[in-house]
Amino acid sequence: MALVQITTATELASLRQQWRSEGRSLGLVPTMGNLHAGHLSLVQEAKSQCAAVLATIFVNPLQFGPNEDFARYPRTLAADLQALTAAGCDAVFTPTVAMLYPAGLEQHTLISVPRLSALYCGKSRPGHFDGVCTVVNSLFNMTQPDAAFFGLKDYQQFFLLRKMVADLHMPVRLIGVPTVREASGLALSSRNGYLSTAQKQQAAALYRTLTGAAGELSAGADDYAALCRRAEQALRDTGFVPDYVEIASQHSLLPAAPEERSLVLLAAAWLDKTRLIDNILVERTGGLP
């Protein structure tokens, strides 16, 4: 079946009603385009769980701060449509800024998850997660999916969206899909396109550093501050400028206590002008008091 491209809310409502009348469950894959294998893994997971799959492509200005890369963020719609067709996606919704923010960005109602959105990436990107939650809330309202699929590369984003859904009693299941990586370990990201071939090899040090720190945690290390300092220095030694390396609870996203067993190592760092993020989940099962 050919991919259906939807550009208006009326078309979207009509297609959603058709699928509902046919008893087809809907899986939503929200993206900002410039699709790679990580995005397509979300489509495949959605296809395995839902009868119909809808992707969205929208570069959301509300989640970009001043001096960030909104203007140069890669927009590759023609290639994206080909990739979604090959992946077996049923439809794609490509709204405009005016459609999602009819009163303008400054006057638009915001959805905010307090406290947690100010941690980690939120410290250096104030307002970023408000923009993410706001646009995802709008897309949920417009598409009314049964389930929505997000990559776990941005663990903080997934956690905040899951909390938003729970707090606002949204009738949608959120499914986190494991990070897809290059052979070097580098997490796939649209921003990897900013990197040269040599920089991509250099960037793999981010995952190697987190893997080493995760090994220490699994072995029972509990001086989190010292471990994070060592990881940040390791990143500096490989040419990164660290934004942060932090250890949080998988269950609360708050800084982890020494006795915590389910941890997530979170990191963000700059390589030249490109900011990369990654994380590793750690389950401490032995060697603890």
Image (tube, helix red, strand yellow):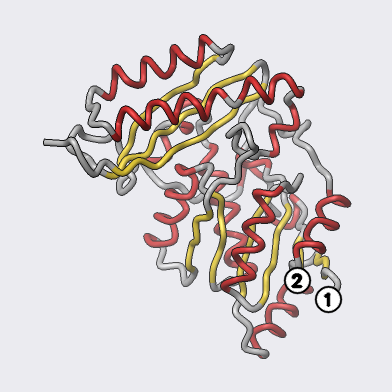
Q: Position of residue 96 (x, y in %)?
A: 77, 53
Q: Position of residue 289 (x, y in %)?
A: 11, 36
> Looking at the image, which residue sits at the far left?
289
Q: Position of residue 189 (x, y in %)?
A: 65, 38
The mark tally for this picture is 2
Q: Position of residue 91 (x, y in %)?
A: 76, 68
Quarter location, residue 34: top right
13 or 32: nearer the viewer: 32
Q: Which residue is at 60% across, 64% downward?
A: 45
Q: What secondary structure is marked by label 1?
A: loop
Looking at marks 1 and 2 on the same chain, the residue that comes earlier in the sequence is marked by 1
Is disc 1 in contact with disc 2, using a CB cutoff of under 8 Å?
Answer: yes
Residue 17 drawn above or below residue 280: below
Amino acid type at mark 1: Met
19 or 139: nearer the viewer: 19
Q: Is residue 230 left or right of residue 277?
A: left
The residue carrying mark 2 is 90
Q: What secondary structure is marked by label 2?
A: loop
Quarter location, residue 76: top right
Quarter location, residue 217: top left
210 or 51: nearer the viewer: 210
The residue carrying mark 1 is 1
Viewport quadrant of the N terminus: bottom right
Q: Which residue is at 51% across, 11% downward?
A: 236
Spatial separation of the CA atoms under disc 1 and disc 2:
7 Å
Q: Which residue is at 62% across, 32% downward?
A: 184
Q: Which residue is at 26% across, 31% downward?
A: 219
Residue 143 drawn above or below residue 94: below
Amino acid type at mark 2: Asp
Q: Callout 2: few (<14), some (14-19), or many (20+) C-alpha neighbours within 10 Å? A: some
